[in-house]
Image: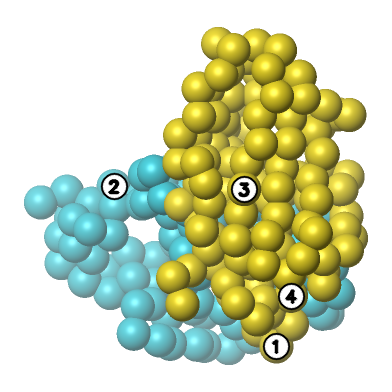
Amino acid sequence: LAKTTQPISMDSYEGQEVNITCSHNNIATNDYITWYQQFPSQGPRFIIQGYKTKVTNEVASLFIPADRKSSTLSLPRVSLSDTAVYYCLRLDTGRRALTFGSGTRLQVQP
Amino acid sequence: DAGVIQSPRHEVTEMGQEVTLRCKPISGHDYLFWYRQTMMRGLELLIYFNNNVPIDDSGMPEDRFSAKMPNASFSTLKIQPSEPRDSAVYFCASSSTGDYTEAFFGQGTRLTVV
């Protein structure tokens, strides 16, 4: 199934902007890029989704270049509560089920 | 809506026993997913349903695992007999045809088989 590659872990400090880049070289025309966040002892939670260019919501921004082979999740001014695992996924709109990779463990320090 | 509801939250059972995990999806959602999460393997899709019909069960580990969805508001994942390697957190999620990206996950069931 579709694979994505992202860093295993990242460290940041409160108030900084964090950018997590995901590689998806073999993305299909019908695939969307979606990001989920998971806190310890909780199920994953949807953050943002996009097809190309830039998408912004109250939580994050998602940048997808024209070739769509990568995407970058941007978290502005992170706080301690943003410490979590962030998953980049390719969503096959035909198959519908989400396939999770290993994710990026973000640790925010005071 | 209260979100996706899973029960029990925690289950400890002895090897060889039957275990049944339960899930109530969000009302109106027509897709239901079962995932398993372990440290070693991460989040794995086990099976998913559309309109109560199993669409893809290729992730079900073996015949000891079975899942049913008798109606739109209830699903079960059964393990019989259970083994220690089945210890994991099992998540249920649901989504709607009209919003294919956002799947809503339950709080999970932490299963420990001793």
Instruction: Evaluate whether label 3 is on the same chain as label 2.
Output: no
Residue linked to disc 2 = A107
Q: Name the colour assigned to chain B in the rendering.
A: yellow
Residue A62 lies, with reference to residue B73, above or below; the image says: below
CA–CA distance in space, label 3 to label 2: 33 Å
Task: Tell me whether circle 1 and circle 3 mark residues in contact (CB < 8 Å).
Answer: no
Q: Percent x, y for residue A15?
A: 15, 67
> Marks 4 and 2: same chain?
no
* Chain designation of label 4: B
Q: CA distance from mark 3 to mark 4?
A: 17 Å
Check disc 3 and report the residue beneath it.
B22
Chain with colour cyan in the figure: A
How far apart are the alpha carbons under marks 1 and 3?
25 Å
Q: Nearer the viewer, mark 1 or mark 3?
A: 3
Of badges 4 and 2, the one in the foreground is 4
The label on residue B30 is: 4
Q: What's the amino acid at mark 4?
A: Asp
Q: Nearer the viewer, mark 3 or mark 2?
A: 3
Q: Nearer the viewer, mark 3 or mark 4?
A: 3
Q: Earlier in the sequence, mark 1 or mark 4?
A: 4
**Secondary element at image label 3:** strand
Q: Left or right of A11: which side holds B86? A: right
Q: Residue at x 67, y 76 (%)?
A: B29
